[in-house]
Each structure stands twice: as C-alpha cells, then as structure tokens.
Amino acid sequence: MSSSLSAVPDIDEDLAQAVMERLVTVEDRLRDSVATNDHLARWTARHLMDAGGKRVRPMLVLLAAALGDMHRDDVIDGAVLVELTHLASLYHDDVMDSASTRRGTRAAHEVWGNNVAILTGDFLFARASGLSSRLGTEAVRLHSLTFERLCLGQLHETVGPQEGEDPFDHYVFVLADKTASLLALAGQLGAQLSGAPQGVDDVMRRYGEKVGVAFQLADDVLDLESDPDTSGKTPGTDLREGVPTMPTLLVRRRAAEGDLGAESLVHALESDLSDDEALSRVVTMLRQDPALEETRALAQRTADDAVAILEELPEGPVREALIAFTRTLVERRR
C-alpha cells in the first residue's frame, strides 16, 4: 500500500474513507497503465512509481470530485492521468537538475543513464496522452495545454530571466508553469469528470494555480530544512545545481542593495559546492538567514489566497477538507 494513504489530511471521517478507498484503486490502475511487454521499460517506468510519493495530485482530483460524484470511473482515470504526467516530468527534471536521488532512491538517470531516463519520461507522457483520449476531447485539450506549460516552465527555468525582467516575477511564472499547472489540471478535471455543478471546475482551476505556487515555495524551504533520512532528498540539492529558489533570490536582492552579510552568502553560493561539506556549510548559512522565514511567510500568504478562493464553494466537509489539504501542503516537513 502506498505511503500516500497516510497523507490523507485530517478531514471528515466518511470523506476520508472514500478518498482512501479510491486512492487504492488509483494505485492499482497506475501500475496497470504502465504495463508493457518491453523488458527494459517495465522496470524503468515503475522505478519512481514504486518509490512511493505523496500522491498530492490524485488526492486533489478526488477531493475536487467529491463536489460531484467521486465514484465515477472517469475520475479514477483523471487521477491516474495527472500522476502519470507528474511522474514523467520527474524523470526529465532529475536529468536537467543532475539530481542523484528521488523519493529516497537513486534517480533513474543514475541507474540507467540520461538517455534511458528521458525516454522513460517520454514513454509515461505517451501513456498519459493515451489515457486522456479515453476521457474525451476536453481532457485531451486540457492535458496538452498543461504539458505545454510544463515544458515552458522548464525552458524558462533553464534559460533564466531575460534582460530587464524582474527575477522574482520570472521565478513565480516558472513555479506556476512547472508545478501549479498540474495542480490546476487536477482540480479542474476532478470537478469536470465528477459532474460537479457548473462553475466549480473554474474555482478548482484557480485554486490549483494558487496552491501550486504555495506548494513549491514550501518546497524551497524544505530543500534547506529537510532531513535526508525522512525526505529522501539531500538538503541544498538545488543550490548545488545552481537552480534559483526564493531564499537565494531574496539573499541576492539584499546583496544588490549593499547588505554585507548577504554579499558574503552570495559569494558562498557561487563557490564550488560539489563537496558535501561545502554544501552543508552554505545550507547552514541559509537556514540562519532571514530569507528562509521570508519564504515560509510568502508560502503561507499564498496558501491563504488559495483558501480564499475556496470560499466560493458551498460550505461543508469537502470545502473543509480542501482547506486542510492546503495547510498540509504548506506546513509539511517532508
């Protein structure tokens, strides 16, 4: 049983039970969705799936679907669709970021090499596309637009802000495309495929956009605070690869304004961090810098904005569950 089941937020008991039961079905269908006779692909495609995960996106599909009929079979396919797309993106991201671990296990490119990891991600995208075709033309359209945003987010993160572009605006746009787009799809599809009342899908789309940014800002904090024994991720991985995060952007802004302490930290950030001890020193410096708490506060404010959108939904256990889900995403420790 996936570790995702223990991640169901503290919500109405009947709703929690229904979500847990459907998550079990999602897990089974996830594995069925990547079944293949190809000897290599059958192992590479399940590598990250078998490593577990929080299943945040399928859970959001199900919670949104609870605003209609969660037990429609298409809802399960929608949950599998978003998780397959997410998993596919992880194979690519780990190659781009040279990440050595993912979910407590070796990244796929560390096991089979970059080419196999990239092609496995493509294979999962192909399976996700096939699944969307079973859900109808609207699901195909929404999935393709989300896929486009995922690609553009990675492209813009790789290239960086253009001349004259505000680095903070650029960063939030990257977060919106790379993370929030898929959460927006999860909320929108869950509502649509469950037959929820008109307009609910748009509320869930807007909520997903906002909570996705909050989720990634919280992840920026976790990248510095995480315990590798529980998170499966080495603290400071993004720093080592030179990937911008909100804390480092805040430090660089203070350095540009003449803050001597920030200037010293920027110098450390730009040094050789390939050595674990050097990386650990910089992580410690950032943990003690005000930028970390500023990022945590920004994540919380963005989560509050997401909760405000949920006020447009009818009162009841589903809305309360979505509020609890939001808090769980932002206040998590792993």
Image (cartoon, rainbow, N blue to C red):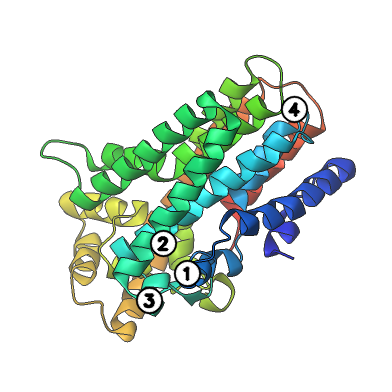
* Left or right for 23, reference 140: right
Q: CA distance from mark 3 to mark 4?
A: 42 Å
Residue holding disc 1: 44
Q: CA distance from mark 1 to mark 3?
A: 8 Å
Mark 1 or 3, nearer chain start: 1
Q: Are marks 1 and 2 in contact (CB under 8 Å)?
A: yes
Q: CA distance from mark 3 to mark 2?
A: 10 Å
Q: Residue at x 29, y 37 (%)?
A: 169
Mark 3 or 2, nearer chain start: 3
Q: Are marks 1 and 3 in contact (CB under 8 Å)?
A: yes
Residue holding disc 2: 120
Quadrant containing the N terminus is: bottom right
Q: Residues within 10 Å of mark 1 (few under 14, many from 20)?
A: many
Q: Residues within 10 Å of mark 2 (few under 14, many from 20)?
A: many
Q: Are marks 3 and 2 in contact (CB under 8 Å)?
A: yes
Q: CA distance from mark 4 to mark 2?
A: 35 Å
* Left or right for 71, reference 77: right
Residue holding disc 4: 67
Q: CA distance from mark 1 to mark 4?
A: 36 Å
